[in-house]
């Protein structure tokens, strides 16, 4: 009965954000220590769930080490990186001898001392288990990786969907590969290619071109060659000023290095041909998007979902201000990330009238907004996801409140940054999203997992913010000069 150590360390590091990602930011989302890394994730749709299901089905024993994740902030402090990587490596050491290691990592984590943090995690695990124990890794589609990771790991599997609704399947593929490898009838063989493109997240919806065309081409290869076990096509995370930034193709075959190389090169070239679509697209600015939403609402195409994709700190006030000035009614925003505004509402209590000053404290978030209204909901901001993405997972927004500011407009305040992924992103705060005319979410693509089917209309907005649709507004220093479209050689 094979014994497989399991660990998770997930962070998407936005290197342009000033606020560092600390131990507290990981603790805020809830860290699972030791065997709890397995037990707590059994019922949560995700990579570890996929590992555990496949391993236990085959009679293998999953041994937990640690599972930690934090919301998007700047560089991960060395203290946080060392704490969780240390727990992971110690957990593997304590579990020795193990037959294999499965790691759920992100691919865009940047620690203060380790720009390629995932490769460092795998090298440290490798130094404990040696070269003969397979170490296999799952990553998010926003992974920025290069050969350092594929040199250190035996196989790498990146989720294929954005919204990430297939993370369990990705975990299952990794665990299946692990078991086949241990049984001796599979030889994991990888190739990696980078087309040299960085892309704003909002253009990376997997169900539309160009991403859907990349996937279709990968599936053609897979049909022709059953020796291809898995193809990963990651468009990467553009808001990272790191040397391994940008799109990555990784192909895992059964012992066929030449085939892995050929497929990875072909898919990488195909991405390069379609680079323009991946990197640039006209998106409505704040005022136009607000006008469009008002128009659509007046045509009863409700709820109109406005996706404020550029807001990375959760406190942008510009879109909300524009809509309120235009006389928007029956609108809700989930959420305004502002602990003080949430606290003011909680202190006043349900039913109280209160005036709050909120938002506008971030790096590119507009001016703070004064809002007055009646508190309709207060709570601890914890809820469980029920939609297709992350189902069963707990979301922690910290102390939270909802303020009814008149005309049916209800603003949700949270103490932590919050991305809406399903109906609970509003319902947990006492707002029925399907009864609203206009919804503002701080999300690029993940909200589509639920709202694509129920929204009357979706409007993408490129409001000013730290996650712009035009990467040209950011200044990169560490990316390769030929990275399209913002490397030194292109601009
Ligand atoms: Zn992602």
Image (cartoon, rainbow, N blue to C red):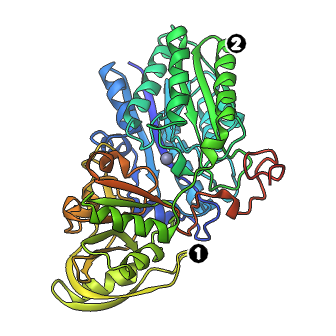
Q: For residue 22, which quarter of the picture?
A: bottom right
Point 38% across, 44% down: residue? 37
| Mark 2 in CB contact with mark 1 (< 8 angstroms) | no
Numbered-mark total: 2
Relative to the observer, which residue lies in front, 35 or 387? Answer: 387
Q: SS of the residue at dot 2?
A: helix
Count residues near mark 2 (Cα–Cα under 10 Å), then give few for <14, some for 14-19, many for 20+: few
Point 35% across, 58% down: residue? 420
**Image location of residue 438, percent across then percent down:** 30, 66
Question: Mark 2 sits on what residue?
Answer: 258
Count residues near mark 1 (Cα–Cα under 10 Å), then give few for <14, some for 14-19, many for 20+: some
**Image location of residue 217, percent across then percent down:** 55, 22
Question: Mark 1 sits on what residue?
Answer: 363
Residue 166 visible in this rendered orientation of the protein = yes
**Image location of residue 105, percent across then percent down:** 52, 42
**Image location of residue 71, percent across then percent down:** 47, 59
Question: In this image, 115 relative to 221: left or right?
Answer: right
- Position of residue 89 relative to residue 16, above or below, is above
Mark 2 and mark 1 lie on one chain; the one further toward the N terminus is 2
Relative to the observer, which residue lies in front, 92 or 487? Answer: 487
Q: Quadrant of the C terminus?
A: bottom right
Q: Is mark 1 within 8 Å of ligand 1?
A: no
Question: In this image, 115 relative to 338: left or right?
Answer: right
* Dot label at residue 37: none
Point 58% across, 21% down: residue? 252
């Amino acid at each position: 009965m094979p014994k497989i150590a399991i660990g998770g360390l997930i962070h998407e590091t936005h290197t342009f954000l000033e606020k560092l990602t600390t131990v507290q930011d990981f603790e805020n989302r809830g860290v699972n220590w030791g065997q709890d890394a397995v037990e707590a994730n059994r019922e949560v749709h995700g990579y570890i769930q996929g590992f555990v299901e496949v391993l236990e089905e085959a009679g293998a024993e999953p041994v937990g080490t640690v599972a930690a994740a934090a919301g998007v902030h700047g560089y991960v402090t060395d203290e946080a990186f060392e704490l969780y990587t240390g727990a992971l490596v110690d957990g593997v050491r304590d579990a020795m001898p193990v037959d294999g290691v499965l790691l759920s990592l992100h691919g865009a984590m940047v620690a203060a001392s380790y720009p390629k943090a995932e490769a460092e995690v795998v090298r440290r695990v490798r130094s404990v288990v040696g070269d003969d124990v397979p170490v296999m890794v799952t990553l998010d589609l926003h992974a920025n990786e290069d050969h350092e990771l594929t040199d250190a790991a035996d196989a790498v599997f990146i989720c294929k969907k954005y919204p990430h609704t297939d993370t369990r399947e990705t975990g299952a593929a990794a665990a299946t590969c692990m078991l086949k490898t241990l049984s001796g009838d599979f030889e994991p063989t990888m190739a990696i290619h980078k087309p040299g493109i960085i892309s704003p997240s909002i253009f990376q919806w997997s169900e539309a071109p160009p991403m859907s065309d990349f996937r279709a081409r990968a599936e053609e290869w897979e049909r022709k060659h059953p020796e291809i076990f898995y193809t990963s096509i990651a468009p990467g995370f553009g808001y990272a000023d790191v040397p391994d930034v940008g799109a990555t193709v990784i192909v895992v075959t059964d012992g066929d290095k030449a085939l892995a190389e050929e497929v990875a090169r072909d898919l990488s070239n195909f991405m390069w041909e379609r680079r323009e679509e991946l990197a640039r697209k006209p998106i409505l600015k704040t005022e136009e998007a607000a006008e469009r939403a008002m128009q659509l609402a007046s045509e009863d195409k409700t709820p109109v979902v406005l996706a404020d994709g550029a807001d990375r700190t959760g406190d942008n006030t510009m879109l909300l201000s524009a809509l309120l000035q235009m006389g928007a009614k029956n609108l809700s925003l989930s959420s305004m990330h502002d602990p003080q505004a949430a606290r003011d509402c909680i202190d006043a209590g349900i039913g109280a009238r209160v005036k709050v000053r909120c938002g506008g404290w971030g790096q590119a978030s507009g001016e703070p907004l004064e809002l007055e209204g009646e508190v309709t909901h207060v709570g601890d901001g914890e809820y469980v996801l029920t939609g297709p993405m992350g189902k069963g997972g707990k979301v922690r927004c910290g102390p939270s409140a909802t303020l009814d500011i008149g005309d049916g407009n209800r603003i949700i305040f949270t103490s932590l940054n919050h991305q809406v992924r399903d109906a609970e992103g509003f319902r947990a705060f006492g707002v029925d999203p399907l009864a609203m005319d206009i919804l503002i979410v701080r999300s690029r693509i993940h909200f589509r997992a639920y709202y694509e089917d129920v929204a009357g209309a979706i409007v993408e907005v490129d409001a000013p913010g730290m996650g712009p649709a035009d990467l040209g507004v950011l200044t990169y220093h560490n990316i390769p000069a030929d990275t399209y479209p913002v490397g030194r050689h292109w601009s």
